[in-house]
Image (cartoon, rainbow, N blue to C red):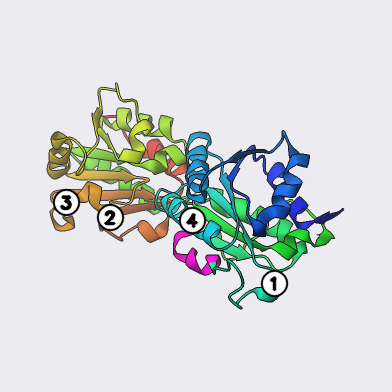
């Protein structure tokens, strides 16, 4: 089926189940906006007054729905205005797909009007980004972008599309599967590490669970509660993990760290085992690392292997999806 590049982008968004787009039109992304009315009401566009608002709105949409948020911006200043919102999504592991317009292909790298190397600018704050030079690559790139943004540790992906690519016609082909040799998120933990963690829980006298955003991302609410009740372990949560455990549960203590309650920091100091789930032991929680949890061995459950051992050294590391890790751990944990 022959389509323009702009039609391909919107067709891909519709096939990905996108319902809301937040953005602001400009010269380099006008082909997208010219095509949008044909996809209404399947795709609803929310006009913002500044591109930063589009990125933050897409971020908020993703947090509430669990699906990737989508934002549009034009080239140059429009694209760079997205950066703060993209960085926010990166830090908080929020799935987001940002689609920006770019100068036409012959002007790339020639300092054309409103040209900015947005793919280079966003390398440190995206899971991946693309500069699309071939209209026939759009369906594959869009499919990959949503897959990358929403799997493993979620995060933002940026797609930069030159205006002439948006206007060019090509053959639309929707890839049914995504195959990325260099990207294979690990979901299942090492069984030996699961056994080690279960043994540490059994041997501990003052265990404590520190639950983070990863519990919510993987929807491990039931599994977290099962572990806490089965092993009789109190639970504290990070700021982003607050809704991961019932606030009225007798085992819930609240939030630790700089902005938390004093007794939770005391609980960390007195614990002989700290079970961190879907969190990165950042400085707002730990304070001075050398003084953090001085008596505790640490079990770290985390989908991103880059976070394991970065700030604290775990006695057991369960690298995988939080829900799957907890399911396997709960099979081995004994009632206390």
Q: Is mark 3 on a helix, strand or loop?
A: loop
Q: Earlier in the sequence, mark 3 or mark 4?
A: 4
Q: Which mark is residue 105?
A: 1
Q: Earlier in the sequence, mark 4 or mark 1?
A: 4
Write down the residue under mark 2: 314
- For mark 3, what is the residue? 292
Q: Can residue 177 be seen in this view?
A: no
- What span is in magenta? 118-126
- Helix, strand or loop at disc 2? loop
Q: How far apart, in angstroms, are the residues tagged by discs 2 and 4?
A: 39 Å
Q: Are marks 4 and 1 in contact (CB under 8 Å)?
A: no
Q: As displayed, is residue 139 above or below residue 45?
A: below
- Image point (80%, 62%), residue name: 168
Q: How far apart are marks 1 and 2 (CA)?
A: 49 Å
Name the mark nearer the viewer: 2 or 4: 4
Instruction: State the separation of the CA atoms marked 4 and 1.
Output: 22 Å
């Amino acid at each position: 089926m022959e389509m323009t590049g702009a039609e391909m982008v919107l067709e891909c968004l519709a096939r990905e189940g996108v319902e809301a787009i937040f953005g602001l039109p400009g010269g380099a992304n006008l082909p997208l906006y010219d095509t949008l009315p044909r996809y209404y009401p399947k795709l609803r566009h929310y006009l913002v007054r500044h591109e930063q608002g589009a990125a933050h709105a897409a971020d908020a949409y993703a947090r509430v729905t669990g699906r990737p948020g989508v934002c549009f911006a034009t080239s140059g200043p429009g694209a760079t205005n997205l950066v703060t919102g993209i960085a926010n999504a990166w830090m908080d592991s929020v799935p987001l797909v940002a689609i920006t317009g770019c100068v036409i292909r012959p002007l790339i790298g020639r300092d054309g009007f409103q040209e900015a190397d947005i793919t280079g600018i966003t390398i440190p704050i995206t899971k991946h980004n693309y500069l699309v030079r071939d209209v026939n690559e759009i369906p594959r790139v869009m499919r990959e972008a949503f897959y990358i943004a929403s799997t493993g540790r979620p995060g933002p992906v940026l797609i930069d599309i030159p205006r002439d690519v948006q206007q060019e016609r090509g053959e639309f082909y929707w890839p049914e599967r995504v195959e990325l040799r260099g990207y294979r998120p690990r979901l299942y933990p090492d069984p030996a590490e699961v056994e080690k963690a279960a043994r540490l829980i059994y041997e501990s006298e003052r265990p404590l669970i520190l639950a983070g955003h990863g519990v919510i991302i993987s929807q491990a609410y039931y599994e977290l509660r099962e572990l806490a009740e089965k092993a009789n372990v109190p639970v504290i949560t990070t700021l982003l993990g607050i809704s991961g455990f019932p606030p009225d549960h007798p085992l819930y203590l609240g939030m630790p760290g700089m902005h938390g309650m004093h007794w939770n920091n005391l609980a960390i100091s007195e614990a002989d085992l700290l079970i961190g789930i879907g969190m990165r032991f950042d400085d707002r929680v730990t304070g001075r690392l050398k003084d953090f949890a001085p008596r505790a061995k640490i079990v770290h459950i985390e989908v991103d292997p880059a976070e394991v051992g970065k700030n604290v050294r775990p006695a057991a590391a369960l690298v995988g999806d939080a829900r799957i890790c907890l399911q396997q751990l709960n099979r081995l944990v004994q009632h206390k």
